[in-house]
């Protein structure tokens, strides 16, 4: 179970670090997904900052073996993905919401394996 937790922690940290940096920088590639569902660019950049913070929490929590920091990172990712799923459904783009569903499931497993 510890190996599963390690893999999920590091995978989510990498995904959200890259995604957060891409959104926070304001690049067209990073903001294209949020634009497709009608999410404002300014808020998307703020979400990118939260993704970077969640990723940092996972990385630092893993490195220091601090379960609380990891939990904060997983919970932040869970809420960010819940919001993403909501906006995908609201925009009638359910098919493009599947990656967010997979990531929320991984975050849930990460929380359960702490």
Image (cartoon, rainbow, N blue to C red):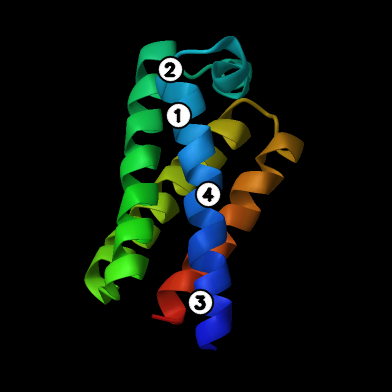
- Mark 1–mark 2 CB contact (< 8 Å): yes
3 is higher (above) or lower (below) than 103: below
Q: Secondary structure at mark 3?
A: helix
Q: Where the C terminus falls, by quadrant? A: bottom left
Q: Residue at x 51, y 25 (%)?
A: 22
Q: Where the N terminus falls, by quadrant? A: bottom right
Left or right of 68 on screen, residue 28? right
Q: Residues within 10 Å of mark 3 (few under 14, many from 20)?
A: some
Q: Which residue is mark 2?
A: 25
Q: Which residue is mark 4?
A: 14
Query: Which picture quadrant has residue 7?
Result: bottom right
Q: Residue furthest bottom?
A: 1
Return the disc, 2 or 4, that comes first in the chain's sequence: 4
* Whole-number angstrom distance, CA of label 4 to CA of label 3: 14 Å
Q: Position of residue 40 (x, y in %)?
A: 43, 14
Q: Residue furthest front?
A: 63
- Mark 2–mark 4 CB contact (< 8 Å): no
- Mark 4–mark 3 CB contact (< 8 Å): no
Q: Which residue is mark 1?
A: 21
Q: Position of residue 98 (x, y in %)?
A: 70, 46
């Amino acid at each position: 179970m510890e190996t599963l937790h390690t893999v999920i922690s590091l995978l989510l940290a990498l995904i959200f670090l890259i995604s957060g940096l891409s959104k926070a920088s304001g690049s067209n590639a990073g903001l294209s997904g949020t634009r497709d569902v009608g999410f404002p660019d300014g808020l998307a950049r703020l979400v990118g900052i939260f993704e970077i913070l969640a990723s940092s929490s996972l990385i630092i929590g893993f490195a220091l073996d601090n379960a609380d920091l990891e939990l904060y990172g997983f919970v932040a990712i869970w809420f960010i993905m819940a919001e993403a799923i909501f906006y995908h459904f609201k925009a009638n783009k359910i098919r493009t919401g599947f990656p967010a569903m997979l990531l929320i499931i991984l975050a849930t497993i990460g929380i359960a394996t702490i």
